[in-house]
Amino acid sequence: MTSATAARWSLAAAIATMAVWGANFAVTKHVLEHIGVGPFLFFRYLGMPLIAFALLAWIYRRRLGFALPRRGDWARFAGLGLLAHTGHVGIVIWGIHLSTAFSSALVLTSGPVFTLLILAALGAERLRASQVAGTLAALGGILVFLSDKLAAGLARAGLGDLALLFAAALFSLYTVLARPLVERYGPLLLLCWTLAFGAPPLLLASIPSVLALEYGAVPWSAWAWLAWAVFVSSFLGWLAWAWVNSVRGLARTAPLQYLMPPIAGVVAWLTLGETFTPLKLAAAGVTMAGVAWAQFGGGRAPPREAAQPDAG
């Protein structure tokens, strides 16, 4: 695959991932209403490692030794697993449970700001003026979305929104730190070995709630959407996002996360009955314009090779 072809496919994959993740907020709210946070995390982190390692065993069936990380990288995989899965996802699911689908999507889109700050601090990528300006414009749209809560004071945002803000910072840190490993091992190995370390703490912590769940009272739709959330949104989504970051660069992909709130808003309106004012709809337009500006404005990107540090 040529670099131009990879760039086109990576953009399509990024937009598809944002559509899936945007819709997943309403899906998650539906499932959480019926089974709660603990069982959701348990079944997610029981299913994802099984799928990931089954795929790994099939792909590397005649050369399993090549699927093992280097000795010096084991600690990195462990740290990223605890950061991304135990920390980020555990907090996100809890935060969504305490907040609304739309508000959750909005708060989590603060992630690109954290990503750009981390990149600038580390000197990992040179940022074009259009990327910074587009990201700030998109952030301005998000602030308008949240203007009613901001006007009422920070306490109005609630514990769920504050937890999601922290989770967004964790995901940005993971995205930056994971890049050398995904370029060295590929998305599948990154997902498998981070799950190997990040899933067990969540599984152990969730066992009591799983045993207490009244399975007979859970509708079939909750189980069906849980399967969708595990396989499509979680497993395929994390693989796609790791590959997209490796092809397009973090500074170009981070603003795409601003596509999630409009998508989450439409799905929440259709499925959960959430409503939005004309001001919020206008802010969605500003957000999407900012994403486009960050993606396509300002000409060619600076060379990545000269700006990328490898953690060694």
Image (cartoon, helix red, strand yellow):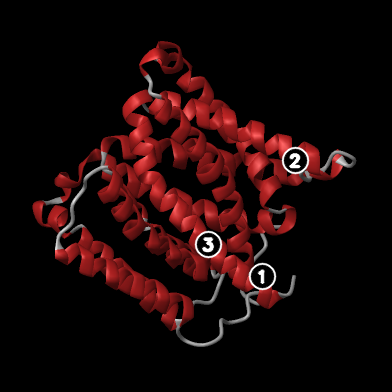
Q: Going from the N terminus, do you reach mark 3 or mark 1 first?
A: 1
73 on left or right of 207? right
Near mark 2 (Cα within 10 A), the count class, few <14, some 14-19 or many ≥20, is: some
Q: Earlier in the sequence, mark 2 or mark 3?
A: 3
Using a 10 Å C-alpha cutoff, classify the residue at mark 1 as few (fewer than 14 neighbours), some (14 to 19) or many (20 or more).
Answer: some
In depth, the one of 40 and 153 nearer the eye is 40
- CA gap, disc 1 and disc 2: 23 Å
Q: Nearer the viewer, residue 209 or 30?
A: 30
x, y percent for residue 178: 60, 53
The residue that appears at 36% across and 47% down in the rendered structure is 166
State the CA–CA distance, disc 2 to disc 3.
Answer: 23 Å
**Residue type at tag 3:** Ala
Q: Does residue 103 show up?
A: no
In the image, what residue type sits under mark 2? Answer: Leu
| Quarter of the figure with residue 52 | top right
User: What's the residue at 14%, 45% (across, down)?
Assistant: 156
What residue did someone put label 2 on?
A: 56
Residue under the image location 44 percent in, 56 percent down: 19
Mark 1 sits on what residue?
6
**Measured Cα–Cα span from mark 3 to mark 1:** 12 Å
Question: Can residue 162 be seen here?
Answer: yes
Residue at 88% across, 42% down: 63
Q: Position of residue 244 (x, y in %)?
A: 59, 62
Work out which quarter of the rendered image holds the N terminus and state it.
bottom right
Q: Is residue 233 above or below residue 279?
A: above
Taking 90 as reference, is 303 left or right? right
Q: Earlier in the sequence, mark 1 or mark 2?
A: 1
What is the x, y in percent for residue 58? 79, 39
User: Which residue lies under the disc numbered 3?
Assistant: 14
- The quarter of the picture where residue 81 lies is top right
Q: Name which quarter of the figure residue 94 lies in.
A: top left
